[in-house]
Image (cartoon, rainbow, N blue to C red):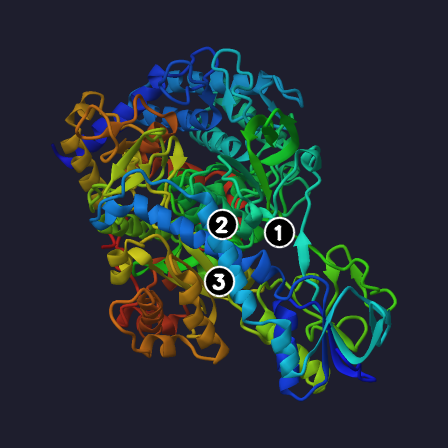
């Protein structure tokens, strides 16, 4: 940067996905924008998160498909051997290729002032980077997070991997322990198992992906087991030690103890927000160990400073970069009132099958006394899924009962991350079951599952629910004859006859 | 063979399990027929109810059945309770598995609220049935109510909204409770009705918040995958035409829900997505034994087999193992389908007619010397108990009639918000 303006419209601390998207959006609105990054552009997602892991997953899937060749009428190659260095070379090559798309020079050409260095707030309206002070009308903190470190005795001494350094591995770990059954733990456990590692995964909850629906977690459990992953649910890792070349982990499930010897330990137990040494106190930005507190407008306790992404406490949405960019630009630069809660934000765990969700969960609807019904189509009901040999999974449309209003959806399918987008679009556009049911689709496609579920919902609305005889007692007298006449009541003269 | 004769033989065959595998000294019933198996308190509860059926069917004299029930109740009344690991129970609850001879905790198992509830379902069956003014029958009633009053159901919440799934003397409560519809309906009914240590009504409401009302294969139902979930509480409680808040909202009832769950089971079996040899006469994915440890390529992919596990539809797990007793125990809900399935099983395995007792599981796609596939060796007490009770409900509604008059069951259901029908 050759000249520093007296005051920027927007200073962005952190050039990860949220920072980059917001910077581009702000420039598009004619704002004077500074972007500060102490490391490399692209942040976690590009460098150590989504992109490397999805690259690894793709290769792992290829190996699985080679082994499954006979299921498709093919012949499995003999002597399938994993060339691990080649796998990791591809990860790094793709990461480098994507990084080239957005060099600092290109950003500068767009008019964004890019500063390399560590940013610290010096006051409520200024940031210092090295010797340079940047004054601002508004600022965005998008410094992301780093892997959380679980307090397991001996873990530091034994050494462990996280998503920050696992993609730098050169040597194939023959035995791998994954601590944590969240999205990244499950994704990498399955990928390494498919690449030939003997993987053990330990999760201290009764199911994987604690926030997801039980049926989705059940299918994931089955999938991991099929890939040969040794699963320890409800289990804690209580200590780690080294014995020769081995890393030994002591596990405990209630009163039952177990020991696992591995070559590498991968920790995937969540994130710790990058809030240290940012001078947030001087800027009047409230934060704690869980992150920066923001309101529904992504505003911090300092009304001119916003925060977005993993550095925030409790926003509960991963991958909100696009939404964050739009919200921050609107609210910071145009005195807007865009709310995070108004966004329809889908997310996906990229295991096989993938697990994607958008909108409300059933449990949240019920807790809030919202009558909810799920229209479920199993992937084994879908012609294309059968053809593709990808029958594990389902589409569930969660609907406000008695209406066509979509509350949310969960999709478990080989390509759930793509399928969820149709539902997400419908919800964003305010479309309901009727629209999803009417939309034409090429045949055969896996997204037919969505249309089938919507169609069931629409049919159900037009026909009305079927009632057992007991329900008649709950109906007012004048509705009983209507119910019987309309065929809503099931034939159940006594318990000796079957319902079908 | 006519249906009635077939049903009679199957019920009698299941009853004989309890004759063969009960310790006459303490009434403890083996979890399985396998050597060295401990007793299961849930099976003991079923065994108590089986005594009532046997008395009514004339398989045991009423005095004999009462005497056997008394042995069991006296054992639980006098067995040691406390926080130490080597006792029978704690705070009125009992450990899931007990040594059949000493009655002490076995297999380092958990103190189990759900299995204690199944035990007390049996206790209340004998309390309701043995109503005569004899010394033995009076003692049965006194002991039964005394044991019930000892159970500290509220403690089992561990200060949380819902009841924990277990407690271990070494590590305390399991850190998770019941999620989703399950056999815990019975547990909550008994826990809500306790005269001494009831759980609050809000506990049931919180649990039912985790229910999922789904439209699957054309049926609307409260989802649970394994069939036993839709059966266990129904062995004792007549859920026809009574509704809690959830079922009122959905205009259904739990009995109807089980019928629909059977429809879903049969439709899944018809589709047979994993090509396991199922059909509309070969269904019954439930909790049961399985061919663990075996793997076999199936249609180009490795198939992984489970051991004793809860299998379910339509989301799995499904390793090709059918629990034939689950189909038979569907008799009160879908008699034609249940009998059709059982006749199919007996066609494949006519040797099961030697004992008229169905195994815990069979698997037509697993490897083994028998070309018909794997069959679980021996028998499981839970399966046999459920068969005796469900057949009896189908034949005479005996268990349902008894518990309809049981104050604890009535009160518990009412506190859970049930109304209508016989309530």
Disc 1 versus disc 2: distance between alpha carbons? 14 Å
Q: Which residue is mark 2?
A: A88
Residue B358 in the image: state x and y as whole percent: 26, 28
Q: Chain of mark 1?
A: A
Residue at image point 32% right, 21% down: B17
Say left or right for B261 vs B276: right
Q: CA distance from mark 1 to mark 3?
A: 26 Å
To which chain does the residue with label 2 belong? A
Q: Residue B409 location in percent, x, y?
A: 50, 41
The mark nearer the N terminus, 2 or 3, is 2
User: Does B413 appear above or below B302?
Assistant: below
In this orientation, which residue lies closer to the viewer: A18 or A216?
Answer: A18
Q: Is residue A381 left or right of residue A230?
A: left
**Residue pointed to by mark 1:** A164
Lower sequence index among marks 1 and 3: 1
Residue A290 appears left or right of A252: right
**Which x, y percent locates residue A464?**
34, 71
Which image quadrant: the C terminus of chain A? bottom left
Upstream in sequence: badge 1 or badge 2 = 2
Q: Secondary structure at mark 2?
A: helix
- Residue at mark 1 shares a chain with residue at mark 3: yes
Tag of residue A74: none
Instruction: Look at 55% across and 54% down and name the residue there.
Output: A211
Name which residue lies at 32% across and 29% down.
B294
Query: From the viewer's perspective, is residue A200 above or below residue A405?
Result: above
Farthest residue to the bottom: give it.
Answer: A30
Q: Is residue A362 visible?
A: no
Q: Is circle 1 on the same chain as circle 2? A: yes
Q: Secondary structure at mark 3?
A: strand
Q: Position of residue B35 (x, y in %)?
A: 38, 14
Query: Is disc 1 placed on a helix, strand or loop?
Result: loop
Q: Which mark is residue A357?
A: 3
């Amino acid at each position: 940067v050759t000249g520093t303006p007296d005051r920027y419209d927007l200073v962005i601390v952190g050039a990860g996905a949220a920072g980059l998207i917001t910077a581009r959006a702000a420039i598009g609105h004619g704002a004077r924008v500074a972007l500060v990054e102490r490391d490399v552009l692209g942040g976690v997602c590009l460098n150590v998160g989504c992109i490397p892991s999805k690259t690894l997953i793709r290769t792992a899937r290829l190996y699985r498909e080679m082994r499954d060749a006979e299921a498709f009428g093919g012949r499995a190659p003999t002597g399938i051997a994993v060339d691990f260095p080649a796998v990791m070379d591809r990860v790094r090559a793709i990461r480098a290729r994507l990084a080239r798309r957005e060099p600092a020079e290109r950003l500068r050409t767009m008019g964004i002032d890019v500063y390399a260095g560590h940013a610290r707030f010096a006051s409520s309206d200024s940031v210092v980077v090295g010797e340079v002070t940047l004054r601002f009308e508004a600022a965005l903190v998008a410094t992301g997070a780093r892997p959380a470190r679980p307090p397991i005795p001996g873990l530091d001494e034994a050494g462990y991997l996280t998503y920050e350094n696992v993609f730098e591995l050169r040597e194939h770990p023959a035995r791998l322990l994954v601590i944590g059954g969240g999205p990244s733990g499950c994704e990498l456990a399955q990928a390494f198992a498919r690449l030939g590692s003997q993987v053990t995964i330990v999760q201290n909850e009764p199911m994987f992906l604690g926030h997801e629906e039980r049926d989705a977690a059940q299918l994931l459990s089955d999938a991991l087991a099929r890939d040969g992953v040794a699963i320890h649910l409800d289990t804690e890792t209580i200590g780690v030690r080294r014995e020769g070349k081995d890393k030994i982990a002591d596990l405990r499930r209630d009163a039952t103890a177990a020991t696992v010897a591995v070559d590498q330990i991968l920790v995937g137990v969540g994130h710790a927000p990058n809030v240290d040494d940012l001078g947030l106190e001087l800027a009047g930005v409230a934060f704690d160990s869980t992150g920066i507190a923001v309101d529904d407008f992504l505003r911090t306790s300092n009304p001119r400073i916003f925060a977005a992404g993993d550095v925030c406490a409790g926003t509960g949405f991963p991958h909100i970069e696009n939404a964050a960019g739009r919200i921050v630009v609107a609210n910071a630069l145009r005195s807007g009132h865009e709310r995070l809660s108004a966004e329809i934000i889908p997310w996906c765990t990229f295991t096989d099958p993938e697990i994607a969700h958008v909108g409300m969960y059933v449990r949240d609807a019920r807790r809030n006394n919202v009558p909810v019904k799920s229209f479920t189509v199993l992937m084994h009901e879908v012609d294309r899924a059968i053809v593709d040999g990808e029958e594990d999974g389902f589409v569930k449309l969660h609907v406000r009962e008695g209406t066509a209003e979509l509350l949310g959806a969960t999709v478990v399918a080989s390509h759930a991350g793509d399928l969820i987008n149709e539902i997400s679009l419908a919800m964003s556009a305010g479309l309901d079951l009727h629209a999803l049911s009417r939309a034409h689709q090429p045949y055969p496609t896996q997204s037919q599952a969505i249309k089938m579920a919507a169609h069931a919902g629409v049919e159900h609305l037009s026909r009305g629910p079927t009632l057992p005889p007991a329900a008649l007692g709950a109906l007012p007298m004048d509705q009983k004859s209507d119910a019987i006449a309309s065929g809503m009541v099931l034939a159940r003269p006594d318990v000796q006859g079957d319902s079908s | 063979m006519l249906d009635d004769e077939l049903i009679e033989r199957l019920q009698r065959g299941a009853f004989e399990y309890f004759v063969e595998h009960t310790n006459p000294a303490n009434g403890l019933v083996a979890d399985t027929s396998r050597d060295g198996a401990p007793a299961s308190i849930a099976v003991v509860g079923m065994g108590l109810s089986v005594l009532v059926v046997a008395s009514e069917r004339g398989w045991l004299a009423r005095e004999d059945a009462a005497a056997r029930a008394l042995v069991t109740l006296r054992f639980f009344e006098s067995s040691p309770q406390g926080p130490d690991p080597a006792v029978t129970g704690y705070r009125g609850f009992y450990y899931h598995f007990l040594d059949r001879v000493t009655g002490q905790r076995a297999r380092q198992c958990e103190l189990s609220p759900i299995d204690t509830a199944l035990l007390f379902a049996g206790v209340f069956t004998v309390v309701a049935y043995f109503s005569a003014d004899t010394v033995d029958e009076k003692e049965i009633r006194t002991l039964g109510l005394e044991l019930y009053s000892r159970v500290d159901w509220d403690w089992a919440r561990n200060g949380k909204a819902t009841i924990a799934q277990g407690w271990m003397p070494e590590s305390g409560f399991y850190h998770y409770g019941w999620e989703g519809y399950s056999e815990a309906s019975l547990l909550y009914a008994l826990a809500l009705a306790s005269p001494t240590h009831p759980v609050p009504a809000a506990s049931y409401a919180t649990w039912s918040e985790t229910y999922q009302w789904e439209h699957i294969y054309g049926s609307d139902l409260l989802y649970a995958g394994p069939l036993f979930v839709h059966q266990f509480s129904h062995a004792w409680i007549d859920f026809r035409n009574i509704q809690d808040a959830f079922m009122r909202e959905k205009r259904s009832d739990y009995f109807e829900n089980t019928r629909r769950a059977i429809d879903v089971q049969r439709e899944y079996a018809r589709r047979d997505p994993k090509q396991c040899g199922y059909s509309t006469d070969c269904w019954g994915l439930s909790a049961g034994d399985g061919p663990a440890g075996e793997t076999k390529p199936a249609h180009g992919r490795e198939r992984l087999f489970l051991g004793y596990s809860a299998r379910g539809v339509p989301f799995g797990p499904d390793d090709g193992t059918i629990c034939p007793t689950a189909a038979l125990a569907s008799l009160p809900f879908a008699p034609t389908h249940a009998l059709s399935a059982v006749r199919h099983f007996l066609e494949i395995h006519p040797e099961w007619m030697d004992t008229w007792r169905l195994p815990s599981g069979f698997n037509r796609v697993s490897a083994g010397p028998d070309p018909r596939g794997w069959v679980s060796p021996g028998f499981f007490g839970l399966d046999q108990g459920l068969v005796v009770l469900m057949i009896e409900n189908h034949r005479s509604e005996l268990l349902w009639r008894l518990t309809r008059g049981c104050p604890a069951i009535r009160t518990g259901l009412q506190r859970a918000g049930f109304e209508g029908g016989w309530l």
